[in-house]
Image: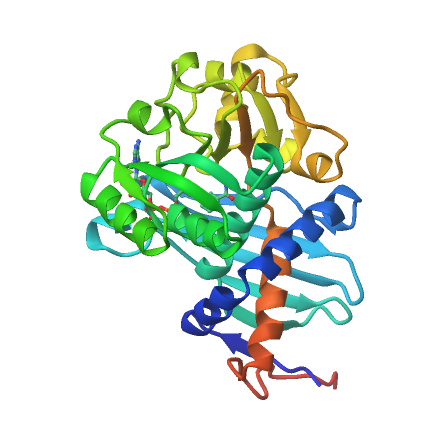
Amino acid sequence: MFPFHLMGGPDIRAVVERSRPQLVDRVRETYLAHHRGETVNPNSYFLRFPEKPNARIIALPAFLRGDPGVAGIKWIASFPDNITRNVPRASAVLVLNDFATGYPFACLEAAQISAARTAASAVLAAERIHGSRTADRVAVIGAGIIARTVLEFLASLRWSIGRVAVHDAVPGYARRYAEHAGSLGYPASVADTPTDAVTGADIVLLATTATEPYLLDVGILAAGQTVLNISLRDLGPDVVAAAYNVVDDVDHCLTAGTSVHLAEQKFGHRDFIDATLAQLLLDEETPGRDKPRVFSPFGLGVLDLAVGLEVLAAGRRAGRVTAVPEFFGEVERW
Ligand SMILES: NC(=O)c1ccc[n+]([C@@H]2O[C@H](COP(=O)([O-])OP(=O)(O)OC[C@H]3O[C@@H](n4cnc5c(N)ncnc54)[C@H](O)[C@@H]3O)[C@@H](O)[C@H]2O)c1
């Protein structure tokens, strides 16, 4: 009566690899559900450590209404220094709770879920803002797991890309990324500086682990460029204020020292926020080409729930989910 299931990383990877377009659809539906008020998505809670100022573990509780509704929480650690040991920065679990009883019914390895929902929202925004699935040049700054996942999602949607220019603070990571892009059918080259990468790009993907803005000159971005500001803290406040800004959720995104939050603090207002992604998806707003167009997704817990549910269902069909019988100690009240 109270089944509990586990799904590990290799099984989730296998499911994600063959369901990327469906996950993008699921993320689109979830943004629209959030827009309609069919979600409860409290602020993320950041556990920080004075001894490790760049590390954090974030709790993202959420509830997605539906039939049946599902609640849950992603608990995701971000330890950027892991990179020096060749260990991924992010590690996570996602717990899903049944809305009828509140009982947890599944625990999923969630670094893969999180990367997939982040990449799905990036490609969704890229297509809507850029206006097609064809780009002459894509710039990537920060050649890590998130940037790799975004490229894999673009490839799964058969984007046509003339060239990828990739810059990373560590040139070896940029070279490896360029090779991976090549293996996906995208010619790629390493750019020595962010400016070299960004100049002439239709689409710019920011996926670094920078904690302070370093792209400060308003001239760094060009009118009409589509900027996927996934890492959220690369752009200076003046660059943000000079752009057309799209966010996933206004209140969420204007927190935690993101570039849009810094812009709000500097200018004392949030008038530079033009639209949410849901408004764009509904054609209620259309970004002009007279300014750079910057998409800043804070990352919503409801997306993790939606993608987690989808992956769990596919995992069950494929026999990739492990049941844990009698997980709970007491399921009948004495
Ligand atoms: N907005 C969201 O919903 C969301 C979701 C998931 C991850 N993220 C963010 O995405 C970012 C990337 O995550 P990841 O897992 O790929 O990390 P990662 O450690 O695998 O990769 C980050 C890369 O950025 C490079 N880098 C760091 N600072 C740089 C700089 N100033 N200039 C150029 N390169 C730089 C590093 O060398 C590394 O190769 C993180 O900041 C993470 O918080 C955002």
Q: Nearer the viewer, residue 258 or 231?
A: 231
Residue under the point 47% across and 17% down: 239
Q: Position of residue 243 (x, y in %)?
A: 54, 19
Q: Is residue 206 visible?
A: yes
* Colouring used for the render: rainbow
Q: Position of residue 322 (x, y in %)?
A: 51, 83
Residue under the point 72% across and 56% down: 64
Q: Position of residue 309 (x, y in %)?
A: 63, 66
Image height of 263 relative to 51, above or below: above
Image height of 67 relative to 300, above or below: below
Q: Nearer the viewer, residue 207 or 37?
A: 207
Q: Quadrant of residue 201?
A: top left
Residue under the point 20% across and 39% down: 171
Callout count:
0
Image height of 44 relative to 320, above or below: above
Q: Position of residue 304 (x, y in %)?
A: 58, 56
The quarter of the picture where the C terminus appears is bottom right
The quarter of the picture where the N terminus appears is bottom right
Image height of 39 relative to 51, above or below: below
Q: Is residue 205 visible?
A: no
- Residue 53 falls left or right of residue 106: left
Task: Give the quarter the ligand 1 occupies.
Answer: top left
- Residue 285 falls left or right of residue 322: right
- Residue 207 falls left or right of residue 120: left
Residue under the point 37% across and 32% down: 211
Q: Nearer the viewer, residue 311 or 57?
A: 311
